[in-house]
Amino acid sequence: MRDVFYVNERPVKGLNEVIAEVATSGSRGAGLTGGDPLSRFERTLTVLQTLKGTFGERFHVHLYTTGVILDADIIGKLERAGLDELRLHPDPHHVGKLLSLLREKRPSFDVGLEIPVIPGGFNEALNLIERAATSDAVNFVNLNELEFSESNSSELRKRGFSISDNGRSAKGSRETALRLIEAAKAKGYNVSLHFCPAKSKDSYQTRLRLYRRGVISAKPHEIVSDDGTILKAVVPESCSSIPAVLLFRGRQGSETSLLVAELTGAQHRLVEELPDFNRTLLNIV
């Protein structure tokens, strides 16, 4: 029940900060999510218009919503603002109403349904896929592996879910998703169906986003590792073997590149950070 506004890990208070973070991240598109961004629709619309106006029509923007407050007027405004894709996380009781609305409005943007795959929820999910396949208002269905995270693990365990061997997802979620894909194929459902493993988000999407941001935001003495982290050397304040022009002020003290520290034989410690807005500290060795 808090009204907060973030782009990636960066808290923002205005459109200039939105533009700055998108540019610093080298982004080619954006996902508007929440909560439900439609609950602050005027702000969402302004952000959408700003992104399209600043980065061009080819900058892809998709929006996630439950669809609870979606109506013909909102669809029209999103369409005129240039939305590329709408992803619905619907309550099963609202699916019929949403499909009717979309059939009536025929928006120019793509529309998909996106759900977490609940172990034991096979029949409900297959029914949703069938409804999407028989509707010409839906372009795709995304099946997300149910993730365990710091914020939801306690609640998931209370509901009887256990964590799988990969340490990221609920046991049985992946297997249920693969069964759904096979069942949809066997029934000949005519809808584009995608499965998104938890590993894809953690190991590829987030990692590559941070790597791009690191390449763009790294200072002259910083190295971007293959894992997307920032590496550099912190040296004692009294260090005299390194020219002042090669020293930089950092939060841990005087910094320089690892190469300079090693070539000059200066005493140093290796610092590893994430290239996010907060420069999250990972290690000092």
Image (cartoon, grey):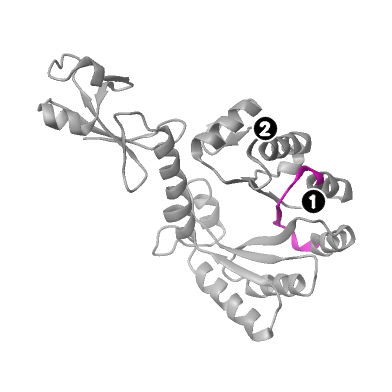
Look at label 2 and name its amino acid: Asp
Label 1 sits on a secondary structure element that is: loop
The residue singled out by tag 2 in the image is 3
Q: Find out whether residue 231 is within the magenta segment.
A: no
Mark 2 Cα-neighbour bin, 10 Å: few <14, some 14–19, many ≥20: few
Q: Is residue 48 above or below residue 257?
A: below
Res 102 quadrant in image: bottom right
The residue singled out by tag 1 in the image is 68
Q: In the visual, does 119 lie left or right of 187? A: left
Q: In the visual, does 180 lie left or right of 74? A: left
Label 2 sits on a secondary structure element that is: loop
Q: Give the residues drawn in magenta, as a range.
A: 80-93
Q: How many marks?
A: 2
Instruction: Identify which residue is drawn at 65% across, 35% down.
Output: 54
How far is the residue under mark 1 from the one under mark 2? 18 Å
Instruction: Identify which residue is drawn at 77% across, 42% down.
Output: 81
Res 122 quadrant in image: bottom right
